[in-house]
Image (tube, helix red, strand yellow):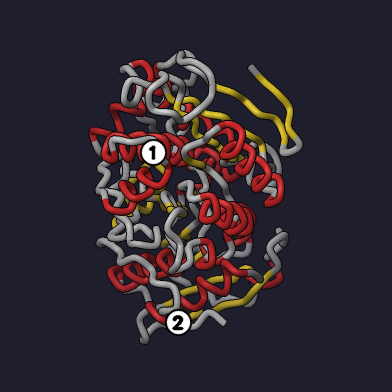
Amino acid sequence: MTATLAAGCLTDLTSGGGGDGNGSGDGSPIVISALEPLSGPFSVYGPRHRAGAEFAAKQINDEGGVRDRQIRIRTVDTASNAQDAVSAFTEAVEQNDAVAGIGPGASEVGIRVGDVAEQKEVPLYLHAAGAVAVVPKEARYTFRTALPATPTVGRAQAQLVEDRGYTEIGLIYEDGVWGDEYGAAVEEYFPDDINITSDSAPIPQTDFVPQLRNFPDDIEVFLGTAHPAGVSSLYPQMYEIGLEPDLFLGAITPMEADYNAMGDNIGQSFASFNLTDMYSDKYAEQASAFNEDSEFGGLFDHAQVAGYTAVQLVAQSIEEAGSTDPTDIAEATRTGSFDLLYASPLEYTEWGEPKNTVQIYNGFDVESSPEFWSDGAFAPVEEFRTDPLPAFEPGSLDLN
Protein backbone atom coordinates (compact mmCIF):
# COMPACT_ATOMS: atom_id res chain seq x y z
CA MET A 1 0.00 0.00 0.00
CA THR A 2 1.06 3.61 -0.33
CA ALA A 3 0.34 6.65 1.76
CA THR A 4 1.44 10.27 1.84
CA LEU A 5 3.16 11.87 4.81
CA ALA A 6 4.40 15.38 5.41
CA ALA A 7 7.90 14.02 4.81
CA GLY A 8 7.02 12.84 1.32
CA CYS A 9 5.92 9.67 -0.37
CA LEU A 10 5.94 6.55 1.78
CA THR A 11 6.28 3.16 0.14
CA ASP A 12 5.32 0.17 2.27
CA LEU A 13 7.05 -2.96 0.97
CA THR A 14 5.42 -6.00 2.59
CA SER A 15 6.30 -9.62 1.94
CA GLY A 16 3.91 -11.60 4.08
CA GLY A 17 3.39 -11.32 7.81
CA GLY A 18 0.71 -9.66 9.87
CA GLY A 19 0.27 -6.10 11.14
CA ASP A 20 2.94 -3.69 12.30
CA GLY A 21 4.89 -4.22 15.46
CA ASN A 22 8.21 -5.52 16.71
CA GLY A 23 6.81 -7.99 19.18
CA SER A 24 8.67 -11.27 19.01
CA GLY A 25 5.90 -13.79 19.24
CA ASP A 26 3.04 -12.80 16.95
CA GLY A 27 4.63 -13.29 13.54
CA SER A 28 4.30 -9.60 12.71
CA PRO A 29 6.82 -8.09 10.28
CA ILE A 30 10.08 -6.58 11.45
CA VAL A 31 9.91 -2.94 10.36
CA ILE A 32 12.95 -1.08 9.03
CA SER A 33 12.52 2.64 8.35
CA ALA A 34 14.26 3.69 5.12
CA LEU A 35 14.83 7.45 5.02
CA GLU A 36 15.77 8.05 1.41
CA PRO A 37 16.53 11.11 -0.74
CA LEU A 38 14.32 9.91 -3.59
CA SER A 39 14.13 13.51 -4.77
CA GLY A 40 16.21 16.62 -4.17
CA PRO A 41 19.98 17.21 -4.37
CA PHE A 42 21.00 13.67 -3.41
CA SER A 43 18.44 11.79 -5.49
CA VAL A 44 21.27 10.03 -7.36
CA TYR A 45 21.55 7.84 -4.24
CA GLY A 46 18.03 7.41 -2.86
CA PRO A 47 16.27 5.29 -5.52
CA ARG A 48 19.32 3.06 -5.89
CA HIS A 49 19.69 2.65 -2.14
CA ARG A 50 16.00 1.75 -1.86
CA ALA A 51 16.29 -0.84 -4.62
CA GLY A 52 19.20 -2.53 -2.86
CA ALA A 53 17.36 -2.51 0.47
CA GLU A 54 14.22 -4.00 -1.06
CA PHE A 55 16.28 -6.63 -2.88
CA ALA A 56 17.85 -7.69 0.44
CA ALA A 57 14.43 -7.83 2.11
CA LYS A 58 13.05 -9.96 -0.73
CA GLN A 59 15.97 -12.39 -0.48
CA ILE A 60 15.64 -12.66 3.29
CA ASN A 61 11.86 -13.10 3.17
CA ASP A 62 12.04 -15.69 0.39
CA GLU A 63 14.35 -17.71 2.62
CA GLY A 64 11.95 -17.61 5.56
CA GLY A 65 12.66 -14.22 7.07
CA VAL A 66 14.50 -13.43 10.28
CA ARG A 67 13.61 -15.56 13.28
CA ASP A 68 10.52 -16.72 11.33
CA ARG A 69 9.37 -13.17 10.68
CA GLN A 70 9.31 -11.15 7.51
CA ILE A 71 11.24 -7.92 6.91
CA ARG A 72 9.15 -4.87 6.00
CA ILE A 73 10.86 -1.82 4.50
CA ARG A 74 8.91 1.41 5.02
CA THR A 75 10.44 4.06 2.74
CA VAL A 76 9.92 7.81 3.02
CA ASP A 77 11.26 10.35 0.54
CA THR A 78 13.04 12.87 2.75
CA ALA A 79 14.41 14.95 -0.19
CA SER A 80 17.48 15.38 2.09
CA ASN A 81 15.43 17.65 4.35
CA ALA A 82 16.56 17.16 7.95
CA GLN A 83 13.24 18.02 9.60
CA ASP A 84 11.31 15.74 7.26
CA ALA A 85 13.71 12.91 8.01
CA VAL A 86 13.40 13.52 11.77
CA SER A 87 9.60 13.47 11.56
CA ALA A 88 9.57 10.32 9.43
CA PHE A 89 11.96 8.40 11.69
CA THR A 90 10.14 9.50 14.86
CA GLU A 91 6.83 8.36 13.40
CA ALA A 92 8.33 5.05 12.25
CA VAL A 93 9.65 4.32 15.73
CA GLU A 94 6.66 5.56 17.76
CA GLN A 95 3.78 4.44 15.53
CA ASN A 96 5.17 1.61 13.40
CA ASP A 97 7.55 0.01 15.90
CA ALA A 98 10.53 0.28 13.56
CA VAL A 99 13.52 -1.57 14.99
CA ALA A 100 16.09 0.36 12.91
CA GLY A 101 16.53 3.16 10.42
CA ILE A 102 18.67 3.17 7.28
CA GLY A 103 19.66 5.51 4.52
CA PRO A 104 19.90 9.18 5.38
CA GLY A 105 22.33 10.94 3.08
CA ALA A 106 23.92 14.34 3.80
CA SER A 107 25.62 15.16 7.05
CA GLU A 108 23.01 17.59 8.41
CA VAL A 109 20.32 14.96 8.00
CA GLY A 110 22.55 12.34 9.60
CA ILE A 111 23.25 14.54 12.61
CA ARG A 112 19.59 15.36 13.22
CA VAL A 113 18.26 11.84 12.71
CA GLY A 114 21.17 10.46 14.73
CA ASP A 115 19.98 12.59 17.66
CA VAL A 116 16.60 10.83 17.41
CA ALA A 117 18.28 7.43 17.24
CA GLU A 118 20.21 8.16 20.42
CA GLN A 119 17.15 9.54 22.24
CA LYS A 120 14.88 6.67 21.19
CA GLU A 121 17.63 4.03 21.50
CA VAL A 122 16.91 2.69 18.02
CA PRO A 123 19.90 1.99 15.72
CA LEU A 124 20.44 4.09 12.61
CA TYR A 125 22.63 2.88 9.73
CA LEU A 126 23.96 5.73 7.56
CA HIS A 127 25.26 5.14 4.06
CA ALA A 128 26.57 8.59 3.08
CA ALA A 129 27.13 11.14 5.84
CA GLY A 130 30.82 11.82 6.37
CA ALA A 131 30.95 14.74 8.81
CA VAL A 132 32.71 13.88 12.06
CA ALA A 133 29.83 15.33 14.10
CA VAL A 134 27.42 12.71 12.68
CA VAL A 135 28.94 10.02 14.93
CA PRO A 136 30.22 11.65 18.13
CA LYS A 137 32.22 9.74 20.73
CA GLU A 138 29.16 9.34 22.96
CA ALA A 139 26.99 7.78 20.23
CA ARG A 140 25.73 4.24 20.78
CA TYR A 141 22.97 3.87 18.19
CA THR A 142 24.38 5.62 15.11
CA PHE A 143 26.49 3.57 12.67
CA ARG A 144 28.21 4.52 9.43
CA THR A 145 28.33 1.89 6.70
CA ALA A 146 29.45 2.70 3.13
CA LEU A 147 31.17 5.99 3.96
CA PRO A 148 33.47 6.36 6.98
CA ALA A 149 34.24 9.75 8.50
CA THR A 150 35.60 12.33 6.05
CA PRO A 151 39.13 12.34 7.54
CA THR A 152 39.35 8.59 6.89
CA VAL A 153 38.74 9.27 3.19
CA GLY A 154 41.64 11.72 3.23
CA ARG A 155 43.78 9.16 5.02
CA ALA A 156 42.98 6.57 2.35
CA GLN A 157 44.03 8.93 -0.41
CA ALA A 158 47.24 9.73 1.45
CA GLN A 159 48.03 6.01 1.18
CA LEU A 160 47.44 6.14 -2.58
CA VAL A 161 49.61 9.24 -3.06
CA GLU A 162 52.46 7.77 -1.03
CA ASP A 163 52.21 4.33 -2.66
CA ARG A 164 52.36 5.81 -6.17
CA GLY A 165 55.05 8.31 -5.30
CA TYR A 166 53.04 11.29 -6.51
CA THR A 167 54.53 14.66 -5.63
CA GLU A 168 52.42 17.14 -7.62
CA ILE A 169 48.89 17.34 -6.22
CA GLY A 170 45.96 19.57 -7.18
CA LEU A 171 42.64 20.09 -5.44
CA ILE A 172 39.80 22.55 -4.93
CA TYR A 173 38.24 22.40 -1.49
CA GLU A 174 34.50 22.63 -0.93
CA ASP A 175 33.55 25.65 1.19
CA GLY A 176 31.87 23.63 3.91
CA VAL A 177 32.29 20.92 6.51
CA TRP A 178 33.45 18.27 4.05
CA GLY A 179 36.14 20.56 2.66
CA ASP A 180 37.30 21.59 6.12
CA GLU A 181 37.56 18.02 7.39
CA TYR A 182 39.17 16.73 4.21
CA GLY A 183 41.68 19.59 4.40
CA ALA A 184 42.56 18.65 7.98
CA ALA A 185 43.21 15.10 6.81
CA VAL A 186 45.47 16.30 3.99
CA GLU A 187 47.44 18.35 6.51
CA GLU A 188 47.74 15.43 8.94
CA TYR A 189 48.19 12.36 6.76
CA PHE A 190 49.70 13.33 3.41
CA PRO A 191 53.48 13.02 2.90
CA ASP A 192 55.52 16.13 3.72
CA ASP A 193 57.56 16.10 0.51
CA ILE A 194 54.73 16.89 -1.92
CA ASN A 195 53.68 20.07 -3.68
CA ILE A 196 50.00 20.92 -3.31
CA THR A 197 48.24 23.51 -5.44
CA SER A 198 44.82 24.26 -3.98
CA ASP A 199 41.88 26.62 -4.09
CA SER A 200 38.34 26.63 -2.68
CA ALA A 201 34.84 27.07 -4.08
CA PRO A 202 31.24 27.20 -2.84
CA ILE A 203 29.30 23.92 -2.86
CA PRO A 204 26.95 24.89 -5.75
CA GLN A 205 29.75 26.11 -8.06
CA THR A 206 29.94 24.43 -11.47
CA ASP A 207 32.37 26.63 -13.43
CA PHE A 208 35.91 25.95 -12.22
CA VAL A 209 37.77 26.99 -15.38
CA PRO A 210 39.09 30.34 -14.05
CA GLN A 211 40.57 28.58 -11.02
CA LEU A 212 41.91 25.60 -12.94
CA ARG A 213 43.85 27.93 -15.25
CA ASN A 214 46.02 28.82 -12.25
CA PHE A 215 47.11 25.22 -11.71
CA PRO A 216 50.50 24.06 -13.03
CA ASP A 217 50.39 21.71 -15.99
CA ASP A 218 52.46 19.01 -14.27
CA ILE A 219 49.72 17.96 -11.79
CA GLU A 220 50.00 14.18 -11.35
CA VAL A 221 46.82 13.56 -9.37
CA PHE A 222 43.81 15.81 -8.93
CA LEU A 223 41.82 15.21 -5.76
CA GLY A 224 38.27 15.93 -6.92
CA THR A 225 37.16 14.29 -3.67
CA ALA A 226 37.81 17.60 -1.92
CA HIS A 227 34.75 19.06 -3.67
CA PRO A 228 32.30 16.15 -4.19
CA ALA A 229 29.48 18.24 -5.64
CA GLY A 230 31.80 19.64 -8.30
CA VAL A 231 33.34 16.38 -9.51
CA SER A 232 31.33 16.01 -12.73
CA SER A 233 32.19 19.60 -13.69
CA LEU A 234 35.81 19.60 -12.58
CA TYR A 235 36.80 16.52 -14.53
CA PRO A 236 35.88 17.62 -18.08
CA GLN A 237 36.86 21.25 -17.44
CA MET A 238 40.28 20.11 -16.34
CA TYR A 239 40.85 18.47 -19.73
CA GLU A 240 39.35 21.43 -21.59
CA ILE A 241 42.17 23.68 -20.40
CA GLY A 242 44.89 21.12 -20.98
CA LEU A 243 45.47 19.57 -17.53
CA GLU A 244 46.05 15.84 -17.92
CA PRO A 245 46.81 14.19 -14.56
CA ASP A 246 47.61 10.50 -14.25
CA LEU A 247 44.64 10.14 -11.93
CA PHE A 248 41.54 12.11 -10.97
CA LEU A 249 39.87 10.96 -7.75
CA GLY A 250 36.10 11.38 -7.51
CA ALA A 251 33.55 10.70 -4.79
CA ILE A 252 31.32 7.77 -3.74
CA THR A 253 28.81 8.58 -6.49
CA PRO A 254 27.40 5.46 -8.18
CA MET A 255 29.60 4.52 -11.11
CA GLU A 256 26.64 4.55 -13.48
CA ALA A 257 25.82 8.13 -12.47
CA ASP A 258 29.43 9.21 -13.02
CA TYR A 259 29.45 7.59 -16.46
CA ASN A 260 26.11 9.16 -17.40
CA ALA A 261 27.51 12.58 -16.43
CA MET A 262 30.85 12.29 -18.22
CA GLY A 263 30.56 9.65 -20.95
CA ASP A 264 33.42 7.67 -22.45
CA ASN A 265 35.96 10.35 -21.51
CA ILE A 266 35.68 9.06 -17.96
CA GLY A 267 38.07 6.30 -18.97
CA GLN A 268 41.03 8.68 -19.22
CA SER A 269 41.92 9.05 -15.54
CA PHE A 270 38.76 9.08 -13.41
CA ALA A 271 38.50 6.81 -10.34
CA SER A 272 35.75 6.82 -7.74
CA PHE A 273 35.98 5.02 -4.41
CA ASN A 274 33.82 2.84 -2.21
CA LEU A 275 34.00 -0.09 0.18
CA THR A 276 32.28 -2.51 -2.23
CA ASP A 277 34.54 -5.26 -3.55
CA MET A 278 33.23 -5.50 -7.11
CA TYR A 279 35.93 -8.05 -7.91
CA SER A 280 34.85 -10.73 -5.43
CA ASP A 281 32.84 -13.87 -6.14
CA LYS A 282 30.31 -12.83 -3.48
CA TYR A 283 29.64 -9.57 -5.25
CA ALA A 284 29.36 -11.26 -8.66
CA GLU A 285 26.79 -13.69 -7.27
CA GLN A 286 24.56 -10.96 -5.86
CA ALA A 287 25.06 -8.65 -8.85
CA SER A 288 23.92 -11.48 -11.14
CA ALA A 289 20.88 -12.21 -8.96
CA PHE A 290 19.93 -8.52 -8.90
CA ASN A 291 20.42 -8.18 -12.64
CA GLU A 292 18.27 -11.24 -13.39
CA ASP A 293 15.45 -10.32 -11.00
CA SER A 294 12.52 -8.99 -13.02
CA GLU A 295 11.56 -6.67 -10.15
CA PHE A 296 14.96 -5.00 -10.11
CA GLY A 297 17.49 -5.60 -12.90
CA GLY A 298 20.35 -3.46 -14.12
CA LEU A 299 23.57 -2.50 -12.37
CA PHE A 300 24.13 -3.54 -8.79
CA ASP A 301 26.04 -0.32 -8.22
CA HIS A 302 27.60 1.03 -5.03
CA ALA A 303 24.41 2.70 -3.78
CA GLN A 304 22.38 -0.46 -4.38
CA VAL A 305 25.04 -2.37 -2.44
CA ALA A 306 24.81 0.17 0.39
CA GLY A 307 21.06 -0.42 0.72
CA TYR A 308 21.50 -4.17 0.47
CA THR A 309 24.25 -4.16 3.08
CA ALA A 310 22.29 -2.00 5.53
CA VAL A 311 19.33 -4.41 5.55
CA GLN A 312 21.58 -7.46 5.76
CA LEU A 313 23.41 -5.80 8.66
CA VAL A 314 20.15 -5.28 10.55
CA ALA A 315 18.97 -8.84 9.84
CA GLN A 316 22.26 -10.41 10.86
CA SER A 317 22.38 -8.30 14.02
CA ILE A 318 18.90 -9.55 14.93
CA GLU A 319 20.03 -13.14 14.38
CA GLU A 320 23.18 -12.56 16.42
CA ALA A 321 21.22 -10.90 19.25
CA GLY A 322 18.39 -13.44 19.18
CA SER A 323 16.12 -10.46 19.65
CA THR A 324 14.30 -7.69 17.80
CA ASP A 325 14.69 -5.26 20.67
CA PRO A 326 16.47 -2.22 19.16
CA THR A 327 18.90 -2.02 22.08
CA ASP A 328 19.94 -5.63 21.52
CA ILE A 329 20.27 -5.06 17.77
CA ALA A 330 22.57 -2.08 18.32
CA GLU A 331 24.71 -4.05 20.78
CA ALA A 332 25.02 -6.95 18.34
CA THR A 333 26.09 -4.55 15.57
CA ARG A 334 28.59 -2.79 17.81
CA THR A 335 30.26 -6.02 18.97
CA GLY A 336 29.90 -8.18 15.86
CA SER A 337 31.80 -8.78 12.64
CA PHE A 338 29.78 -8.85 9.41
CA ASP A 339 31.27 -10.27 6.23
CA LEU A 340 29.04 -8.70 3.59
CA LEU A 341 29.95 -7.31 0.14
CA TYR A 342 32.66 -4.92 1.25
CA ALA A 343 36.39 -5.45 0.91
CA SER A 344 36.68 -6.12 4.65
CA PRO A 345 34.17 -7.20 7.32
CA LEU A 346 32.13 -4.43 8.93
CA GLU A 347 33.30 -4.01 12.50
CA TYR A 348 32.66 -1.06 14.80
CA THR A 349 34.10 1.03 17.57
CA GLU A 350 32.02 1.51 20.67
CA TRP A 351 30.64 4.75 19.23
CA GLY A 352 29.68 3.35 15.79
CA GLU A 353 32.59 4.24 13.52
CA PRO A 354 33.64 1.43 11.15
CA LYS A 355 37.17 0.20 11.79
CA ASN A 356 39.71 -1.44 9.52
CA THR A 357 37.77 -0.51 6.39
CA VAL A 358 39.40 -1.04 3.01
CA GLN A 359 38.62 1.47 0.28
CA ILE A 360 38.79 0.45 -3.35
CA TYR A 361 39.35 2.99 -6.12
CA ASN A 362 37.62 1.99 -9.33
CA GLY A 363 38.53 3.18 -12.80
CA PHE A 364 36.37 2.76 -15.91
CA ASP A 365 36.96 0.44 -18.85
CA VAL A 366 34.63 1.88 -21.49
CA GLU A 367 35.36 -0.96 -23.93
CA SER A 368 33.70 -3.78 -21.98
CA SER A 369 31.05 -4.65 -19.40
CA PRO A 370 30.59 -7.55 -16.96
CA GLU A 371 27.99 -10.20 -17.77
CA PHE A 372 26.10 -9.39 -14.59
CA TRP A 373 25.51 -5.77 -15.67
CA SER A 374 22.94 -6.01 -18.46
CA ASP A 375 23.25 -3.15 -20.95
CA GLY A 376 26.27 -1.86 -19.07
CA ALA A 377 28.43 0.68 -20.89
CA PHE A 378 31.64 0.09 -18.92
CA ALA A 379 33.41 -2.27 -16.57
CA PRO A 380 34.98 -1.38 -13.20
CA VAL A 381 38.75 -1.63 -13.09
CA GLU A 382 40.54 -1.82 -9.76
CA GLU A 383 42.89 1.16 -9.61
CA PHE A 384 43.97 0.98 -5.96
CA ARG A 385 43.06 -0.88 -2.78
CA THR A 386 44.04 0.60 0.58
CA ASP A 387 45.43 -1.18 3.58
CA PRO A 388 42.89 -1.44 6.44
CA LEU A 389 42.14 2.04 7.71
CA PRO A 390 41.88 2.78 11.43
CA ALA A 391 38.59 4.16 12.66
CA PHE A 392 38.54 7.92 13.02
CA GLU A 393 38.41 8.98 16.66
CA PRO A 394 36.54 12.25 17.30
CA GLY A 395 38.88 14.83 18.76
CA SER A 396 42.01 13.39 17.15
CA LEU A 397 42.28 16.23 14.57
CA ASP A 398 42.01 19.97 15.00
CA LEU A 399 38.74 20.65 13.18
CA ASN A 400 37.94 24.07 14.62
The amino acid sitting under disc 2 is: Glu
Q: Residue at x 46, y 74 (%)?
A: 169
User: Which corner quadrant of the image does residue 25 belong to?
Assistant: top left
Q: Where does the N terminus fall, quadrant-wise?
A: top right
Q: Residue at x 68, y 63 (%)?
A: 203
The image shows residue 202 at horizontal and vertical percentages of: 70, 67
Q: According to the image, label 2 marks what residue?
A: 187
**Which of the two labelled residues, at mark 1 and mark 2, occupies the earlier sequence position?**
2
The image shows residue 252 at horizontal and vertical percentages of: 48, 51
The image shows residue 387 at horizontal and vertical percentages of: 25, 62
Q: Residue at x 51, y 55 (%)?
A: 118
> Can residue 128 be spotted in the picture?
yes
Disc 2 crowd, CA 10 A, few/some/many (<14, 14-19, 20+): some
Q: According to the image, label 1 marks what residue?
A: 314
Q: Is residue 270 left or right of residue 324?
A: right
Q: Residue at x 57, y 82 (%)?
A: 400
The image shows residue 242 at horizontal and vertical percentages of: 58, 64
User: Which corner quadrant of the image does residue 395 belong to?
Assistant: bottom left
Between residue 124 and residue 369, name the one nearer to us.
Answer: 124
| Residue 292 drawn above or below residue 360 | above
Between residue 290 and residue 209, name the one nearer to us.
Answer: 290
